[in-house]
Image (tube, helix red, strand yellow):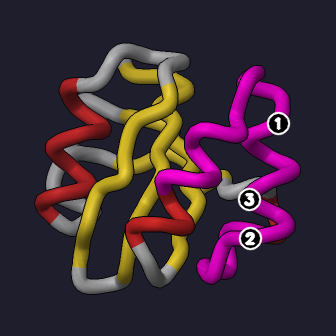
């Protein structure tokens, strides 16, 4: 079964999401920004969502995780939870 490992930063507005995405000049900043700004519990882990399979995340999030280039910051992606900045770390 296919698996992915991704990180995200969840915020409540598109404006904040866009601002955060613009401020990420280097992938290493992603984790720190997630710890500072994410409204998801995963923020404490730098936004790390761990390993998951297709269909385990909400559809809008899932679509990006399974189609975006690995290591490229994506978003903002709107879901019922808010706005996500997404980083796909691995896919297998």
Q: Nearer the viewer, residue 64 or 36?
A: 36
Is 12 placed above or below 64 here? below
Q: Are marks 3 and 2 in contact (CB under 8 Å)?
A: yes
Question: To which residue does mark 1 refer?
Answer: 29
In this image, 89 relative to 1: left or right? right
- Label the magenta part by its dominant secondary structure: helix
How far is the residue under mark 1 from the one under mark 3?
9 Å
Residue 56 picture quarter: bottom left
Q: Where is residue 18 in the image (x, y as percent from the top left)?
A: 48, 52
Q: Is residue 67 magenta?
A: no
- Is the Cβ of the residue at disc 1 closer than 8 Å to that at disc 3? no
Q: Which of marks 1 and 3 is nearer the N terminus?
A: 1
Return the mark for residue 34: 3
Region of the chain picked out in magenta, as a range: 18-43
Q: Residue shown at 63%/82% (left/top)? A: 39
Judging by the rendered image, the residue that carries numbered circle 2 is: 37
Q: Residue at x 46, y 45 (%)?
A: 86
Q: Position of residue 41 (x, y in %)?
A: 68, 80
Marks 3 and 2 sit apart, C-alpha to C-alpha, by: 5 Å
């Amino acid at each position: 079964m296919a698996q992915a490992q991704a990180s995200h930063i969840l915020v409540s507005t598109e404006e904040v999401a866009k601002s955060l995405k613009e401020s990420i000049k280097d992938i290493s900043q992603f984790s720190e920004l997630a710890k500072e700004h994410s409204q998801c519990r995963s923020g404490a882990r730098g936004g790390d969502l761990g390993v998951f399979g297709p269909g385990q995340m909400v559809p809008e999030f899932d679509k990006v995780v399974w189609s975006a280039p690995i290591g490229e910051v994506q978003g903002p992606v709107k879901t019922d939870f808010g706005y996500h900045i997404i980083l796909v770390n691995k896919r297998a």
